[in-house]
Image: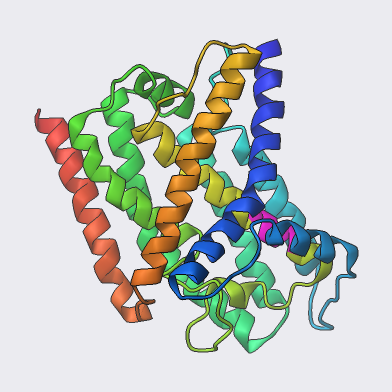
Amino acid sequence: MISFFLFAIVNILVVLILAPFYISLIKKVKALFQGRKGPKLFQAYYNLLKLFKKESIYSTNSSFIMRVAPYINIICSIVAILFVPLLFIPDNYFGFGNIILFLYILALAKFFMALAGLDAGSTFGGMGSSREMSISSIIEPIVIIIFATLAFVYNSVNFFEIFGATSVGLVHASLWLLLIPLIIVLLTETARIPIDNPETHLELTMVHEAMILEQSGKNLALMELSSGVKQVLLMAIIINLFFPIGFNLPLSLIGIGTSLIAFLIKSIILAISIGIIESFIAKSRLFRLPIIFAIAFLLSLITLMMEMLL
């Protein structure tokens, strides 16, 4: 019981504190590769604080959906944090960690974000929500195959049990094929290049930004923070699956501190890698995205078939 409460407090604090940092870090890396100075590493924190101090403005066409969507998003994000262990695994996790429920929680947040985009009655919001749902309908089978493969290999649908197995060196060689599909899922779910461009407000290209274009003040801050939390959680899944060094050390102050340092090093390297990827490739056209998803689906399917045959 005590270890779970410690896990909940540490996990939530670490994710919420680090989420804005990776947003700024990726922007900084992209700027450096483009020959620009870029934002400060703590710029995202300043932006969020500024937004929290501002008033939220609502469209006259909007309903209660516009008002509750940001809060549903941040609540879903905080609950989802309890499903993905970052630093250690508690003795008892009280049913948390179920992969299927985790995916449904993220889907619920995305659903209300899309509804909020439609609720304002603007052309941009409707366009962004339509595109987001179209992309989600394509990426969801890939997500199902990826996590079905993990469940088949480790005989569990729980992140705590899967990460517990990988932390003692039980990463199957064939599962490395899943690294590319997981990175594609990370880029898709966090609206990054080549799937989407989080920096643009051009009508023909924006997807995620179009859905939150009508948000303002603290509501926009909650939406941005929710997106950052999702990014950290998906990064943590990749890190603890394939690079579990320093994860789940003995439960002590030194153990938690060492795990935190190890996670910071690995996550910073992953965030820098994302920034480098975005610096060397361009955003794909909407109708060319199925080619990228087909690659992820094929690699996931091959991995599942290899595990079933071996």
Image quarter where the N terminus lies is top right
Which is nearer the eye, 206 or 158? 206
Q: Quadrant of residue 185?
A: bottom left
Q: Position of residue 93 (x, y in %)?
A: 58, 19
Does 248 sit above or below residue 35? Answer: above
Residue appearing at x 83%, y 65% in the figure: 50
Q: Which quadrant holds the C terminus?
A: top left
Q: Position of residue 48 (x, y in %)?
A: 76, 60
- The number of numbered discs placed on residues in the rendered structure image is 0
Occupied quadrant, residue 306: top left
Q: Is residue 272 above or below residue 258?
A: below
Q: Nearer the viewer, residue 156 or 223?
A: 223
**Which picture quadrant has residue 11?**
top right
| Magenta part of the chain | 221-226
**Residue 95 relative to residue 189: left or right:** right
Does residue 85 appear anywhere in the picture? no
Magenta stretch secondary structure, dominant: helix
Q: Is residue 138 left or right of residue 175?
A: right
Residue 64 lies, with reference to residue 177, above or below; the image says below
Residue 307 is at least partly visible in this image: yes
Q: Which residue is located at x 56 percent, y 75 percent?
A: 199
Q: Please provide percent x and percent y for residue 259.
A: 53, 25
52 to 238, vertically: above or below: below
- Which residue is at the front of the view, 164 or 100? 164
Does 34 appear in magenta? no
Q: Nearer the viewer, residue 9 or 278?
A: 278
| Residue 231 horizontal/vertical position (percent) | 54, 51
